[in-house]
Image (cartoon, grey):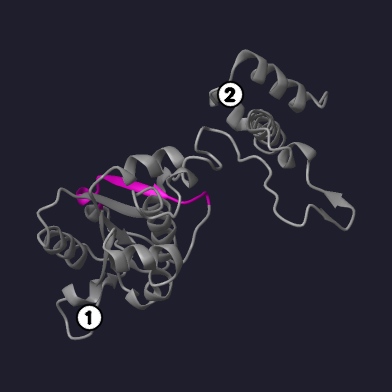
Amino acid sequence: MRIDIITVLPSLFSPVLEASVIGRALASGVLEIVVHDLRDWASDKHRTTDDYPFGGGPGMVMKPEPVLQAVQDVLGKSSTEATVVVLSPQGRRLDQELVRELAARPRLVMICGRYEGFDERILSCADVEVSVGDYVLTGGELPALVLVDAVSRLQPGVLGHEESAADESFSDGLLEYPQYTRPSSYAGMDVPEVLTSGDHARIAAWRRRESVRRTAERRPDLIEHADLTEEERAFAGRVIDGDE
């Protein structure tokens, strides 16, 4: 997968992209991520990418010319079909379903906003607008990094164990089951006996039930659309009602 990122703050990306799992994936060639400085497409000596909004109001708005020219030029840097993503609080909220959709694309071009937002004409180039939550940040750089991390870890060869991406929270509409490691007993808190039993069938059943329980306790809104058996749905209902 190739990811292009257009931003006025390219220096924010290197420390994250060069570290840990993503850094190893870049070094091995599994991922290709290119960060572009939007100011390279500004036409004045001050490299201006924003201006005052028509109609008045506070703050500045990102200008259409540099952004649209940048997108056009960046798209031309590779023949791979690209999906243009605008990071915006007005976009579709990022969830695992959207992550899977975008992870399946061969190339993403992300546009990071700043200031009071985008000139509306910029959105003419967007295939999808994405929001990381119902709150406002100072720019799209942190949301872009969140999206990069989320889609990257679903690429083959990025994680050390291919099953890791499938066996975690939201992968099947549920939160992940509780996890434990050594020591088996600490400060009066013991690891559940089933996990040390060596009985893989019992362990799998326990994990599934605890996943349903945890989701019902912490995110009951997810239960309605989760893929559950009738027995699991009844169990989740009892947890939500406080009967389990």
- Residue tagged 1: 47
Answer left or right for 137 relative to 72. right
* Residue shown at 69% from the left, 17% from the top: 234
- Residue tagged 2: 224
Q: Amino acid at mark 1?
A: Arg
Element at label 2: helix
Asked where in the image residue 6 lies, by quadrant, the reply is bottom left
Q: Position of residue 22 (x, y in %)?
A: 39, 63
Query: Which label's residue is closer to the chain start, 2 or 1?
Result: 1
Q: Amino acid at mark 2?
A: Glu
Q: Are marks 2 and 1 in contact (CB under 8 Å)?
A: no
Q: Residue furthest front?
A: 198
Whether residue 158 is situated above or below residue 222 in the rendered picture: below
Around disc 2, counting alpha carbons within 10 Å, would you say few (fewer than 14), some (14 to 19), or many (20 or more)? Answer: few
* Residue shown at 72% from the left, 35% from the top: 217
Total residue callouts: 2
Whether residue 83 is situated above or below residue 18 in the rendered picture: above
Around disc 1, counting alpha carbons within 10 Å, would you say few (fewer than 14), some (14 to 19), or many (20 or more)? Answer: few
Residue range of the region highlighted in magenta in the rendering: 123-134
Q: Which of the two marks, 2 or 1, is nearer to us in this view?
A: 2
Q: Position of residue 158 (x, y in %)?
A: 38, 55
Answer left or right for 77 relative to 58. left
Asked where in the image residue 45 lies, by quadrant, the reply is bottom left
Q: Residue furthest bottom?
A: 45
Element at label 1: loop
Q: Which mark is residue 170?
A: none
Q: Position of residue 103 (x, y in %)?
A: 33, 46
* Residue shown at 65% from the left, 20% from the top: 232
Whether residue 5 is situated above or below residue 221 in the rendered picture: below
Q: Residue furthest right?
A: 188
